[in-house]
Amino acid sequence: RLSKAVALVIKLTIITGLRRKEVAGARVDEFDGDIWTIRGDIAKAGRIVDEGRMKSGREQVVYLSRQARALFDEARAECADNVYIFPADPLDTAKRSTELPYINSDSVTRAMRRICDDAGIEDLHLHDMRTAMVSFLDEAEVQESIQSALLHHTPQDVTSVHYRRSKREDRLRAAWQLWADHVEKVVNAPEAGPASSENAEHATEASPDQTL
């Protein structure tokens, strides 16, 4: 049976566009209202002395949508300890050679696979939701620099850097909320036709249940 914590990690990964580890390792002290700051790597004398969760190694600021904030509130009430929003199960970490204090991303991957198997969906991975998110935002004519910022990609030119500094917050908030509203609308809609990886990726029907 899918645990509540893992189900919440999957939902949040989909509606934030972040990676599994970035969500699963969320810390209580990273949140300030609806702003979630995930620190990057810490370096001294040109060497990384403390590796962060971001693949890029750089800090990421996430402006939580209404849905994401509600899910994190739910997680804090049911799952969180005094450090991690999604603390690891002590019995699970005892079985691993490499222990993490939070839910292992491999556990999230296995859970997603079970969800897809139960739904009859083939060849769909949680990471594909990042592609679905970009496709949706592109169709909604959200500026490419904003899409890149959501995915935490490095801006390609000086204009992008300037834009992100001057109007970053409002545009990012709007884009994250637009995507979350779309996901909520789709997963709460009546089922239409047989499942497929193409339909599931476009419509994000691979959520753990039918509510967000």
Image (cartoon, helix red, strand yellow):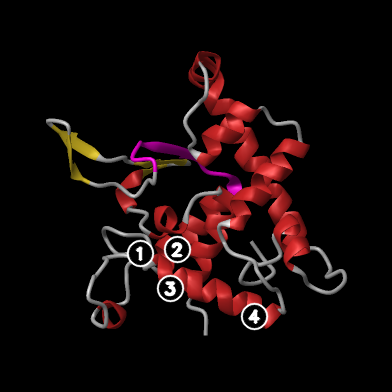
Which of the two discs, 2 and 3, labels the residue nearer the N terminus?
2
Residue 114 drawn at (x, y percent): 58, 79
As helix, strand or loop, the secondary structure at mark 3 comes to helix
Q: Secondary structure at mark 1?
A: loop
**Image position of 98 (left or right of 122):** left
SS for callout 4 = helix
Residue at mark 4? 117
> Gap in Å between the C-alphas at discs 2 and 4?
25 Å
Tell me how far mark 1 sits from mark 4, CA to CA. Answer: 29 Å
User: Exactly how many numbered labels are in the figure?
Assistant: 4
* Residue that extends furthest to the right in the rendered view of this protein: 193
Task: Tell me which label, 1 or 2, sits earlier in the chain.
Answer: 2
Q: Residue at x 71, y 44 (%)?
A: 135
Lower sequence index among marks 1 and 4: 1
The residue at 34%/45% (across/down) is 30
What amino acid type is highlighted by mark number 3?
A: Ser
Real-space CA distance between mark 4 and mark 3, rounded to the nearest whole angstrom: 15 Å
* Stretch of the chain drawn in magenta: 56-66
Secondary structure type for disc 2: helix
Please identify, in this view, whether the residue under mark 1 or under mark 4 is nearer the observer. 4
Amino acid, disc 1: Ala
At label 4, which amino acid type do we have?
Asp
Residue plotted at (65% across, 69% down): 123
Question: Within 10 angstroms of label 4, few (less than 14), some, or many (20 or more) residues?
Answer: few
Q: Which residue is mark 1?
A: 80
In the image, 42: left or right of 92? left
- Circles 1 and 2: CB distance less than 8 Å? yes
Instruction: Name the residue that disc number 2 marks.
Output: 75
Q: Residue 35: in sight, yes or no?
A: yes
The percent position of residue 54, horizontal first and vertical second, equals 37, 46
